Amino acid sequence: MSNRIGPDQIRAMKGREKIPALTAYDFPMTRLLDEAGIPLILVGDSLGMVVLGYKDTTSVTMEEIEHHLRAAARAKPRALLAADLPYRSYDDPQLALKNAQRLIAAGADAVKAEGGRKILPQVQAIVGAGIPFIGHLGMLPQSVREEGGYRIKGKIESERAALIEDAKALAAVGAFAIVLELVAPPVAVEMTRSISVPTIGIGSGLDCDGQILVTSDLLGLFPWFTPKFITPRLNAAEQMRTVITEWRASISPSPKI
Ligand code: KIV
């Protein structure tokens, strides 16, 4: 019998223990996170910025997610391995289902997409086909161009009410968890209390059911940009620079006197 973590186990963590989740885009990181006991690993489209060098997530393609997902899946994690449906890959229910099936074929246990009631028919098509689904509400990085930047959501009453309705709608059609990105912390608390599935926050305060981070931000692996809400716990880029510089010096002939 498999001891792999499934959507039911993640859902059952709500109210019992905090859910730690991190991103991975390749074999070694997936294996490291899994060995560290992270139960939920996401091949996120943050891949676009922290690995592929794009300005935002809107350039990430299905093929790129599939390529990195296959590498992550080769680690055969015990963790639930989720993958992002990239920008424009779920514009209608048929397309959403076709692309969700592609991600499952590439090794994902679940898929995630951004949006609430607007994408409900797509979520219904995915869940209806038996594919586990994670929602994503709040600041939606795939809409950053229309939005003109990243900002906290839920500070005004209309946004607060919409977020709560979106969370309820996603939970009602079968999302087994919902990522809350840059949601005003009191609203994230309200959303968490309003639904029976776990909320997993990023930049949304500490009172969600779980927390997710882009692993490169946690480890200081992408020093050129660090989101305001995170203090890296390791300065990996700086340590790498030091080791590389020392190695470079070590193979150079000593200067002749
Ligand atoms: O793409 C990603 O890494 C994400 C997380 C930040 C939640 O969606």
Image (spheres, grey):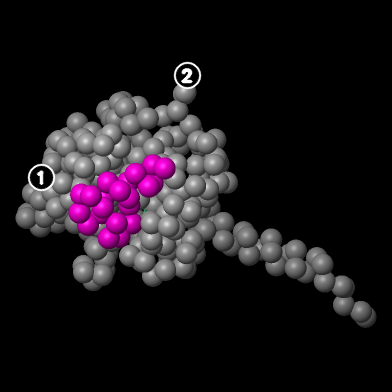
Mark seen at residue 165:
1
Residue under the point 27% across and 60% down: 88
Mark seen at residue 106:
none
Distance from Cα at disc 2 to Cα at disc 1: 39 Å
Residue under the point 42% across and 54% down: 65
Give coordinates of residue 116: x percent, y percent.
17, 49
Residue under the point 30% across and 37% down: 131
Is residue 19 toward the left or the right of residue 78 in the image? left
Q: Which residue is mark 2?
A: 1
* Badge nearest the viewer, 2 or 1: 2
Q: Residue furthest bottom?
A: 257
Identify which amino acid the numbered label 1 is placed on: Glu
User: Does the magenta-highlighted stretch encompass residue 164?
Assistant: no
Residue under the point 46% across and 68% down: 53
User: Does the magenta-highlighted stretch encompass residue 87?
Assistant: yes
Is residue 60 toward the left or the right of residue 118 in the image? right
Give coordinates of residue 101: x percent, y percent.
34, 44
Between 58 and 189, the one lying in front of the other is 58
Q: Residue furthest right?
A: 257
Q: Which residues are magenta?
A: 85-105
Is ligand 1 closer than 8 angstroms to the Cβ of mark 1?
Answer: no
Identify which amino acid the numbered label 2 is placed on: Met
Which element type, helix, strand or loop, lies under badge 2? loop
